[in-house]
């Protein structure tokens, strides 16, 4: 009870008309319509991403997190800031899981200023530590869209042409305090081919609509926490590479993991190169990954070699990104009544109750909508 | 469309109410034009009346699109002539005259250049200034009709410049054979102007009044005469000039006056030749029988007439000296005037006509100078002609006001064949009307007179605006009931520090009675909405903002009505009007007031939804809105969406509901989602099921 006194007092929070969620189905067409639209867009996401599109596999993403006064709003529990940071943590993990050879940086904006929380880097751990620390920041003042975008461009514009340049803004406030006209900045962003996407936490703001439309990004506003998560996860999948982006060959090293047994007398314990800069966790270890070019030792992959600058990855990493290139075909949707066989989903064995079912075009197996999403989002291959 | 067709078939009147942004203009135009094409004999002309110049332009643009579509589909160019008409001020291309700003000055100046007697004089004296555009038009323009097409004001000007013809007279002349005419209400309703411009329009016309809720006000405006002490003073000098001129003319050219005298004896029926350019002096609604009679002997000679005017003036002056409000009917007024200064009713009636004739004889060109005396003589004629229905009001503030109430119902008292109120079919509920009746501290919110000064109410209004400014994106428009009320409230908010809090979220702009300031504020407001800072516009119901300016999409995501916009009930004009309504139509004062207030509230609130993809909050912040009699008077398309759950909310509840609404609305909304619901493809439209549905809807209404 003592740890979070402000959270326990329910009467301090806003009104929650929880009973209305139950009622709205028959009274207003509102919820039904919106859910229908949401369902459609869910489906759309699956169908949209298919076909042979070239996806940008090397991404550079700047995440801009609003830390203004409005982040203290308690409509997400316990408040917007804590909830979003938690979701961003999972996003960061997922991001590096799906895009192992990409980089990410985090910027916070508050009090009319923008600050870098972490630089563009490929190590999820560092970001997550920084995010955990950021939970305690005080939210104050207004955000500045201009300043944060400007800060993001500073690093993004030096990135090579074959990688994607992206900015994802998580905006809670409905106002932005800018030092100059933002329309000019939008033009610059467009010319630099930076894709800006926005997730709004409260409502649709005009300037974001313009910003995302001009730069080719997407703009979404959350309904609740689960929807927020869904929207964030949309950005895990790499965007289609624009036809204008350059193609180039990149040198990569595939170091082998050498495990030295303790009985081996010749093995000498050594430091990992990645621990050079961080003071903590500098342990001596026996085995590790050794750079094929300069034999520097690393304990984890993927990483860029500190000594020779070679990108070090393991084969499974590349394979994981590889499925983006050959995506699973979209399942065809048909009404449940047409189904002649047993009405059971081939994957989860549950009964098919929804009004439509999905079947794989190659093996004709039948799935429910949840399994369809799961197969396309996580498995990336048909189980049957 | 069906209703409209029915109306056209029945050749009766129709009243149609449709929500804003649903394409009233285009559906009206397309049906009537189609009707015109099929039955060219039955409907020969469409007259579309709108209120302001920008609106006229909008209609013409729609029409142009329609015509382009026609010629694209049928492959042949059609021979429709459509044109817009506006005042000289907007159409003049004479370099000197058009540089003047005020409409009256332009009219006056134009008159000095083109009046028939001036032009006649020029034959003898070619040095006089001349408007060559008019001369050219007069010489050749009449023989050559305007080529078919759609002309807006600028097109007319261009055409005029190219041919060297005066666009104003060209347009007026072309009215006769144009198929579609778009112009302002005044040309049809104001008897003074209508007589000249619209007289020759045929009976087989379809007349459309857009935004017809303004009609009664336009009628009253056009027939009211306001006389203040200043007018009387100016009138005095006018009369003196008249006298001097008469003296002068008498010395030089006595025959002229004699000729005029003789003509007056013969009667007022003059040849109509020269009237075209002499618009300015046209007489007010003189019934025909007066024109048949001869001018009474007492005012036939010029000197006598001037003397007569002087007496009348003195009388008016003496009446204006009173310091309390007197309201008297016309017979009373006439009797009084007879008793005091021995002016009979009959000469009064001829006052306007006599003055006109005199001015013509004296060849006074610059009519603008004589506006005061014209006004007085118009007043005299009006007063004596309409024995009933007119109230003469004498104010302590020295204003005579005439409200010609019998004109008002004469126009509005028709029996409509169809009366239909349409609602929108929407794929999603894009409007969210909320009635906020209480503050967070349960104090009832109301702009009622007794609680106006109440700090609790003002504070709660403030907190409502503050909370809304935090959750509504981009633009908010807030309407107050009057400038006075707005000033008081804003001052109180400033003292309580509420304004400062609001400004953290959004910038604040305020509408003032000054037009230039307001348009500046509007411009900045739109800029602030555009670049993401967000803004609030504080304005007044019945003000400029509430009438003519649309807040599309992000420019208006929410409207807040602070209070019920009742008219100022102590106003004399209103009182006279109410009394008239009560006496003639058994309409209770209260009913009319509520009706009027709700009409304006709906007008204000309707500013935000300008189409199906648009969405907006509508917040009525007054507990009186929750009452059934008030709610029932809102348009049907708003009423539909007021559920019991959105009545009498507190500020907090309203905030929660709006948050929810705004999030729902921000979800992506594509055209396919509308398909089949509010947007139909051709196949869908032709399908059996849809046709059935449509006919069902048609039968219901």
Image (cartoon, grey):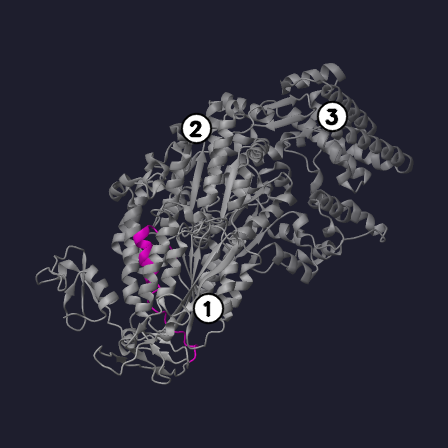
Q: What is the C-alpha distance between the residues marked 3 and 2?
A: 58 Å
Residue A161 drawn at (x, y percent): 45, 77
Instruction: Please tell me which residue lies in front, A326 or B306.
Output: A326
Residue A85 drawn at (x, y percent): 37, 55
Q: What is the C-alpha distance between the residues marked 1 and 3?
A: 87 Å
Note whether residue B681 is visible. no
Q: Quadrant of the C terminus of chain A?
A: bottom left
Q: Of the residues tagged 1 and 2, which is closer to the observer?
A: 1
Instruction: Please tell me which residue lies in front, A165 or B635.
Output: A165
Numbered badge on residue B296: 3
Q: Is residue B611 magenta?
A: no
**Image position of B540 with respect to A347: above or below:** above
What SS does tag 2 mark? helix
Q: Which residue is mark 1?
A: A194
Q: Which residues are magenta?
A: A219-246
Q: Which residue is mark 2?
A: B624
């Amino acid at each position: 009870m003592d740890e979070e006194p402000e959270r326990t007092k329910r009467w301090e929070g806003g009104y929650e008309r929880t009973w209305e969620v139950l009622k709205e189905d028959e009274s207003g067409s509102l919820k039904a319509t919106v859910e229908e639209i949401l369902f459609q867009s869910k489906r759309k996401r699956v169908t949209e991403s298919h076909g042979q599109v070239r996806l940008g596999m090397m991404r550079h993403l700047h995440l801009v997190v609003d830390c203004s006064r409005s982040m203290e709003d308690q409509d997400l529990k316990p408040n917007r800031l804590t909830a979003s940071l938690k979701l961003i943590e999972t996003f960061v993990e997922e991001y590096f899981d799906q895009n192992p050879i990409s980089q990410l940086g985090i910027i916070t904006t508050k009090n009319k200023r923008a600050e870098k929380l972490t630089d563009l880097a490929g190590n999820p751990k560092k970001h997550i530590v920084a995010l955990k620390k950021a939970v305690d920041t005080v939210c104050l003042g207004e955000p500045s869209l201009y300043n944060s975008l400007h800060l993001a461009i500073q690093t993004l514009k030096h990135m090579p042409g074959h990688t994607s340049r992206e900015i994802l803004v998580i905006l809670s406030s409905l106002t932005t305090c800018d030092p100059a006209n933002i329309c000019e900045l939008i033009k610059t962003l467009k010319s630099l081919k930076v894709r800006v996407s926005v997730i709004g936490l409260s409502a649709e703001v005009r300037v974001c609509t313009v910003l995302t439309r001009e730069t080719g990004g997407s703009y979404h506003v959350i309904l609740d926490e689960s929807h927020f998560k869904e929207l964030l996860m949309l950005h895990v999948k790499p965007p289609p590479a624009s036809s204008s982006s350059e193609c180039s060959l990149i040198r990569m090293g595939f170091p082998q993991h050498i495990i030295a047994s303790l009985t081996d007398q010749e093995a000498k314990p050594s430091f990992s190169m990645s621990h050079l800069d961080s003071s903590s966790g500098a342990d001596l270890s026996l085995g590790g990954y050794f750079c094929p070019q300069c034999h520097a030792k690393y304990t984890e992959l993927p990483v860029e070699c500190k000594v020779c600058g070679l990108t070090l990855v393991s084969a499974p990493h590349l394979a994981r990104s590889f499925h983006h290139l050959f995506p699973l075909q979209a399942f065809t949707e048909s009404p449940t009544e047409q189904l002649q066989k047993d009405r059971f989903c081939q994957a989860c064995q549950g009964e098919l109750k929804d009004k439509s079912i999905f079947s794989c075009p190659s093996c004709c197996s039948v799935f429910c909508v949840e399994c369809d999403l799961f197969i396309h989002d996580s498995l990336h291959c048909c189980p049957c | 469309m069906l209703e409209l067709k029915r109306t056209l078939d029945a050749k009766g009147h129709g009243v149609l109410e449709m929500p804003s942004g649903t394409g009233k203009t285009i559906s009206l135009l397309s049906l009537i034009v189609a009707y015109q094409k099929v039955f060219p004999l039955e409907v020969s002309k469409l007259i579309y009346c709108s209120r302001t110049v920008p609106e006229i332009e909008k209609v013409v643009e729609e029409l142009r699109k329609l015509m382009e579509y026609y010629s694209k589909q049928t492959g042949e160019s059609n021979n429709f002539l459509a044109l817009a008409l506006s005042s000289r001020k907007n159409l003049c291309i004479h370099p000197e005259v058009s540089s003047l700003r005020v409409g009256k000055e332009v009219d006056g100046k134009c008159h000095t250049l083109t009046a028939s007697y001036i032009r006649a004089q020029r034959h003898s004296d070619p040095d006089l200034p001349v408007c060559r555009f008019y001369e050219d038009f007069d010489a050749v323009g009449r023989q050559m009709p305007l080529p078919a097409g759609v002309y807006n004001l600028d097109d007319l000007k261009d055409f005029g410049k190219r041919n060297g013809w005066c666009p104003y007279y060209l347009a007026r002349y072309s009215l006769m054979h144009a198929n579609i005419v778009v112009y302002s209400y005044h040309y049809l309703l104001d008897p003074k102007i209508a007589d000249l411009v619209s007289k020759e329009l045929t009976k087989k016309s379809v007349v459309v009044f857009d935004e017809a809720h303004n009609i009664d006000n336009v009628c009253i405006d056009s027939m009211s005469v306001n006389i203040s002490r200043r007018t009387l003073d100016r009138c005095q000098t006018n009369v003196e000039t008249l006298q001097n001129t008469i003296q002068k003319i008498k010395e030089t050219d006595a025959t002229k006056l004699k000729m005029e005298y003789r003509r007056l004896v013969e009667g007022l029926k003059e040849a109509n030749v020269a009237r075209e350019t002499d618009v300015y002096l046209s007489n007010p609604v003189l019934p025909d029988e007066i024109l048949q009679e001869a001018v009474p002997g007492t005012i036939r000679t010029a000197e006598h007439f001037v003397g007569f005017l002087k007496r009348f003036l003195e009388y008016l002056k003496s009446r204006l000296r009173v310091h309390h409000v007197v309201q008297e009917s016309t017979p009373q007024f006439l009797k009084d005037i007879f008793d005091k200064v021995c002016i009979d009713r009959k000469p009064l009636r001829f006052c306007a006509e006599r003055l006109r004739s005199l001015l013509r004889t004296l060849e006074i060109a610059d009519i603008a100078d004589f506006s005061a005396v014209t006004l007085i003589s118009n007043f005299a004629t009006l007063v004596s002609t309409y024995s009933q229905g007119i109230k003469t009001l004498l104010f302590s503030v020295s204003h005579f006001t005439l409200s010609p109430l019998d004109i008002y119902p004469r126009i509005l008292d028709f029996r409509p064949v169809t009366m239909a109120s349409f609602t929108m079919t929407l794929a999603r509920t894009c409007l969210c009307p909320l009635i906020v009746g209480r503050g967070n501290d349960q104090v009832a919110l109301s702009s009622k007179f007794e609680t106006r000064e109440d700090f609790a109410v003002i504070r709660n209004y403030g907190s409502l605006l503050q909370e809304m400014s935090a959750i509504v994106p981009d633009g908010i428009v807030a309407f107050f009931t009057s400038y006075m009320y707005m000033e008081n409230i804003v001052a109180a908010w400033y003292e309580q520090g509420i304004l400062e809090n609001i400004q953290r979220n959004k910038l604040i702009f305020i509408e003032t009675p000054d037009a230039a300031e307001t348009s500046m504020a509007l411009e900045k407001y739109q800029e602030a909405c555009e670049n993401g800072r967000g803004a609030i516009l504080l304005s007044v119901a019945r003000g400029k903002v509430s009438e003519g300016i649309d807040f599309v999409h992000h420019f208006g995501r929410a409207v807040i009505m602070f209070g019920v916009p009742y008219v100022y009930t102590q106003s004399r004009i209103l009182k006279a009007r109410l009394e008239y309504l009560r006496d003639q139509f058994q309409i209770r004062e209260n009913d009319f007031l509520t009706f009027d207030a709700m009409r304006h509230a709906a007008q204000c609130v309707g500013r935000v939804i300008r189409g199906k993809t648009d969405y907006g909050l509508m917040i009525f912040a007054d507990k009186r809105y929750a009452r059934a009699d008030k709610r029932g008077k809102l348009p049907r398309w708003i009423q539909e969406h007021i559920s019991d759950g959105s009545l009498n909310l507190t500020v907090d509840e309203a905030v929660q509901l709006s948050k929810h609404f705004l999030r729902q609305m921000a979800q992506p909304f594509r055209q396919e989602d509308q398909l089949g619901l509010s947007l139909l493809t051709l196949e869908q439209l032709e399908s059996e099921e849809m046709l059935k549905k449509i006919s069902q809807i048609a039968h219901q209404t």
